[in-house]
Image (cartoon, rainbow, N blue to C red):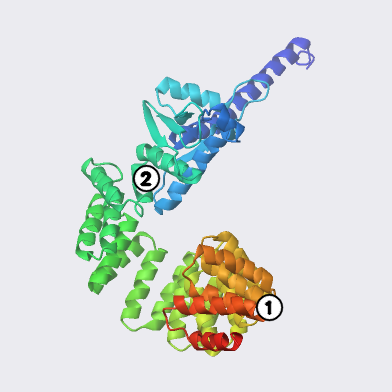
Amino acid sequence: MLRRLSVVGFDEWARNIRSALLNLALLLLVVVLIPILIGQFIRNQVIIEPIAVPEALADRGLTETVVANRLWDALLDVKLAAGTSKETIASLPSSREVEFSFPDSGISIESFVYHARKMFNTYETRIAGEFVCGDADCTGAALQLRLRVIRGSVDVIDLPPVGDLAERQYFFDAAAAVLGILDPFVALAATLETRPVQASTLARRLIRSRHEDAKWAHNLIGLIRANEGDTTAALVEYRAALALDPDFVPARANLGNALFVSGDFDGARQAYQTLRDLDPKNVLAAEGFAELALKAGDAPAAVRHYLDAAEWSPVDPRYLTKAGQIRMAAGDTAEGIILLRRALELDPGYLPAFAELAAMYLVKGDHTAAERIYRDAADYAPNDAEAQSAHGRMLAILHDWQGAALRYERASALSPDTALYRREHAIMLQRQGRHEEALAELGEVAKQSPEDAAVYLAMADSLRDTGRNAEAVTAYRRFLELDTKDDPMRAIAERYIAILSQ
């Protein structure tokens, strides 16, 4: 016992404890670090370096970090425009990278990963570049963006000069060019609406080059053919995609839809069943079965399938809306209203549900109930000019001139080139007796839309009510000259001309 408590014995015991603790710490480090390293190696992330800019551009607030962020935003815009379920690259500006380092060691996980990648010659993809001046003054229109996509090799992208393009569109084009290298399918899908021929050609190139996204290209061409009404050609493309990958869900769903359109209901049912076998809670299969049930006249079964889809995709208002529409058509108005209202709770501006429910109230003459729906849609989408205008029309029906004027004013601010919104705003001011404000607004609308007869009719009414009879007569006559639709107000305008000319 005395020997064990000696200084030598205690020192040996302490060394053993330190050794055990160190080994345990190293074991924990390996257990934690290995998954992180594996994740770092397999992640498909692209780092956007600061983009060098001329001093004149930096003075306007577009610094090298801001430009990198603009490109980051544009990459997201392209992904959204592509509208595909395909997974694509994840990008991040280097300024937003978070480094994890070990305390008091100066060693970070990022530096460890960097050296490990360098050892195995597997570099992380990075985007760098600069804005190049196109003239001595380095003006915005002449600026040109040059980007470098750095992987094992370097791909250089030279964008055309900015010219008259809006900033967001210019960076969208830059991001599409980047994805044309890193994920060509997403790039071509994003330009399908604006450049369909080019997108189709690029999709064919992916197929012929046996690209890993060839199945997606076949599916995309199938959608193009289906939209053109060529169901036979669409079926060929979907089947080609499935030949490459029998479990490819988008092509399987589109195959079922195309077979349904072609009248092959048994084939469509088989395609949807295969889809359900792959994924028992697939909403596309549920929707397909619902359409088949409707075709067979089994409305209750169709509603059940749509409600299943609504449960499996709980934030999508489409399925509740379709179920509600079927209930309404079947005469079950109360249940239909409940389903449509549930859809609008998810998205108050969802047009199919909104239109169905509002139309029902308007047919019944319940303008107050309809106004609440329009109001919710306008509040939900404060930057949608049409939603603001639609609520303004409903408020006008209810003679809430002030509320209607505010909605039309908002719509005009959002869409200043739409003369209709400004004209209706002026008429709402007129209804409140604010004739001078109305006339000022109508004068601007007349400049914007000089052939609009209704503008001069409204001007004539305000001029008449403010005692400016001669000017009112001139405006009424201008209305009669421009009116080509045989407006019922012609007779009234002619009568006012006769009265005011006395």
Q: Could you tell me which quadrant the C terminus lies in? A: bottom right
Mark in the foreground, 1 or 2: 1
Q: Badge 2 is on which residue?
A: 187
The answer to whether 374 is drawn above or below residue 147 in the figure is below
Disc 1 crowd rating (10 Å Cα; few below 14, some 14-19, many 20+) is: few
* Amino acid type at mark 1: Thr
Q: CA distance from mark 1 to mark 2?
A: 60 Å
Disc 2 crowd rating (10 Å Cα; few below 14, some 14-19, many 20+) is: many
Residue drawn at x 54%, y 79% is 476
Q: Could you tell me which quadrant the N terminus lies in? A: top right
Asked whether the viewer can see residue 477, the reply is yes
Q: How many numbered tags mark residues here? A: 2
Residue drawn at x 38%, y 37% is 182
Residue at the extreme front of the image, as rendered: 502
Asked whether the viewer can see residue 345, the reply is no
The image position of residue 415, as x and y in percent, is 54, 61
The image position of residue 218, as x and y in percent, is 26, 52
Whether label 1 touches label 2, CB < 8 Å:
no
The image position of residue 312, as x and y in percent, is 47, 65
The answer to whether 49 is drawn above or below residue 280 in the figure is above
